[in-house]
């Protein structure tokens, strides 16, 4: 059974989340409107363009936002601080890469018919798909996995949580929001920024001396 944190931890979470939300908007909104012609790079595999869109994959894609409230109840202030720093660092690094490599997707955006129509319509309206490399969707999911996986005690719960994260990552490709290079770079960014923010808690004391 999951152990709940303290009310003071939840107040701290709201502060950290608020700061990171502001930072995200400051990075995401400007880079979401970069000109198509800024970069000629098209670092994609040819077979990616022919991969069919799987419309229901937008459900796990949007489920990332459920993860945003997960630490509210289960992480202490120390873990929240590390996660907040990792989020902030990854957002800033990604923002720099968005400016340097404002590539556009090689997918043709199509709004599917069915129960997902309204979801894709709103997604395409909000997301201009210019800030692709790395995928912050993947990076954020990866950071949550690294930060929250230890909360689960049983093997089954760990597998279910890992499967959820894997489905979110896969959904970025099958909803035609990101290419393989975006996903790989997003994973690398998650691992790198998380390691940087927690290394002082794991390195021996003698290695922390200047």
Image (spheres, grey):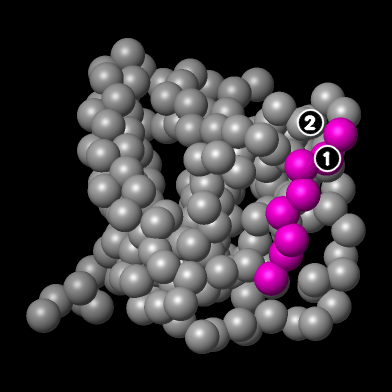
**Residue 59 picture location, percent across and down:** 74, 34
Identify the residue under disc 2: 116
Mark 2 or mark 1, whichever is nearer to me: 1
The stretch drawn in magenta includes residue 207: no
SS label for mark 1: loop
Q: Residue at x 60, y 39 (%)?
A: 123
Q: Eyeballing the image, is 171 above or below 75? A: below
- The image position of residue 131, as x and y in percent, is 47, 62
- Looking at the image, which is closer to me, 164 or 129? 129
Badge 2 local density, few (<14 within 10 Å), some, or many (20+)?
some
Closer-to-camera residue (198/183): 183
Please identify the quadrant where the C terminus is shown: bottom left
Please, what is the dominant secondary structure of the magenta stretch? loop
Contact (Cβ within 8 Å) of mark 2 with mark 1: yes
Tag of residue 31: none
Task: Count residues near mark 1 (Cα–Cα under 10 Å), then give few for <14, some for 14-19, many for 20+.
Answer: some
Q: Is residue 202 visible?
A: no
According to the image, label 1 marks what residue?
A: 112
Residue 62 placement (x, y as % from top left): 64, 36
Q: Residue at x 55, y 33 (%)?
A: 65
């Amino acid at each position: 059974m999951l152990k709940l944190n303290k009310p003071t931890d939840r107040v701290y979470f709201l502060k950290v989340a608020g700061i990171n939300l502001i930072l995200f908007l400051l990075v995401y909104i400007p880079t979401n409107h970069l000109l198509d012609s800024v970069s000629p790079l098209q670092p994609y595999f040819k077979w990616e363009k022919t991969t069919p869109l799987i419309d229901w994959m937008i459900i796990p894609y949007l489920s990332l936002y459920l993860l945003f409230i997960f630490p509210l109840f289960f992480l202490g202030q120390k873990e929240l601080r590390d996660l907040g720093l990792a989020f902030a660092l990854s957002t800033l690094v990604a923002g720099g890469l968005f400016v340097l490599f404002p590539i556009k997707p090689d997918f043709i955006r199509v709004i599917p018919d069915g129960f997902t129509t309204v979801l894709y319509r709103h997604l395409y309206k909000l997301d201009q798909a210019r800030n692709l490399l790395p995928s912050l969707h993947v990076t954020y999911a990866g950071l949550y996995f690294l930060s929250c996986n230890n909360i689960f005690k049983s093997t089954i719960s760990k597998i279910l949580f890992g499967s959820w994260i894997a489905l979110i990552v896969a959904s970025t490709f099958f909803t035609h929001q990101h290419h393989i290079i975006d996903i790989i770079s997003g994973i690398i960014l998650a691992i790198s920024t998380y390691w940087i923010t927690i290394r002082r808690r794991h390195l021996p004391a003698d290695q922390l001396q200047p």
